[in-house]
Amino acid sequence: MGYYIKVESNVKVYVEDINPQGKNTILFLHGWPGSHKLFEYQFDQLPRRGIRCIGLDTRGFGKSDKPWEGYDYDTLSDDVRCVVEAFNLQDFTIAGHSTGGAIAIRYMARHHGYGVSKLALFAAAAPSLIKRDNFPYGLEKDAVNDIIRGTYSDRPKMLRNFGDTFFFQSISEPFSDWFFQLGLQAAGWSTAAIANTWLGEERLFSDLEKINVPTLILHGIHDKIVLFPLAQVQNQCIKNSKLVQFIYSGHGLFYDERDKFNKELINFIEK
């Protein structure tokens, strides 16, 4: 079932709750520039194992409201806290892909892991998507600036180009079109605002050290967006974490190797 949850006086976010009677709960935070629908191939399978799947559309994306402001990680993690409280979630797994992984990490640090018993990170954009002083592992700033310029000049073309680098496995043209349409559901200003967070002061080095729950890190070795060394840094910084390499996956590992992905995630949740 779908719900709208008020996170500010004039902002509501969309949440899909699948199998609400499930014995284990996982809250999914999607990456840029998609929506909760990116996890379709998890929502098809995990409820069969008695797992409750909750998919949140980040503000500015999918079916959620698209305000002009509020795209910093603190505010986005506060939005997650509103959803957790609205659904009275306890002892749940929080899972994030790409920027959604960064938001999950900020939630763990800022809200002291409120209600969370486990954390799952999929190609998480942390601790920094781009290279910085004393951090040589990310993308060049120019790559992100190209995305921002493309968002403002020809967002459909930018999204097509981004989609071409997202998956490692071959995808069908209809699937590519579906992925493209998910990106178009976002507002242009929110698309650019999130991209700007990658360039700004949103750094998660200290956040990683505050995580104290079992953590599963899944990452494709062919990821061209969030490079694989970032997963290794996460594994080094997060206590009680496990890194699983996906050798036939790019950034969209939840589709590239969806059977392995689902198996690893189910085993982690049920353990």
Image (cartoon, helix red, strand yellow):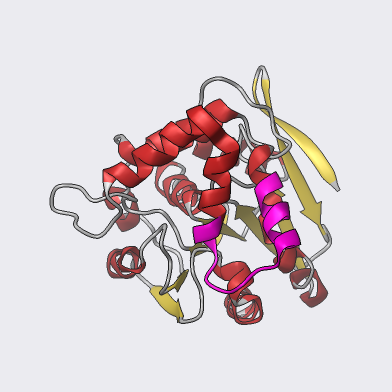
The foreground one among 83 and 132 is 132
Tell me which residue sits at (42%, 45%) in the image. 106
- In magenta segment, residue 178: yes
Q: Is residue 23 left or right of residue 183?
A: right
Which quadrant of the figure has residue 90? bottom right
Prevailing secondary structure of the magenta residues: helix
Range of magenta residues: 164-181
Residue 258 in the image: state x and y as whole percent. 64, 75
Residue lying at the far left of the rendered structure: 134
How many numbered dots are placed on residues in this image?
0
Q: In the figure, residue 268 lies in which quadrant?
A: bottom right
Residue 167 coordinates in the image, percent (x, y) = 55, 66
Q: Taking 70 as reference, is 162 above or below it?
A: below
User: Foreground residue, 267 or 86?
Assistant: 267
- Please identify the quarter of the rendering in which residue 44 is found: bottom right
User: Where residue 239 sits in the image (x, y, percent)?
Assistant: 33, 68
Report the front residue among 75 and 87.
75
Residue 56 appears anywhere in the view: no
Residue at point 86%, 48% (across, down): 1
Assess whether residue 159 is covered by the magenta stretch: no
Residue positioned 36% across, 68% down in the render: 228
Q: Position of residue 52 (x, y in %)?
A: 75, 62
Query: In this rendering, does residue 147 appear at all?
Result: yes
Give the vertical position of 41 relative to 130 (above or below): below
Apparent side of residue 92 relative to residue 77 in the rendered image (left or right):
right
User: Where 7 falls versus 98 (above or below)?
Assistant: above
Q: Quadrant of the C terminus?
A: bottom right
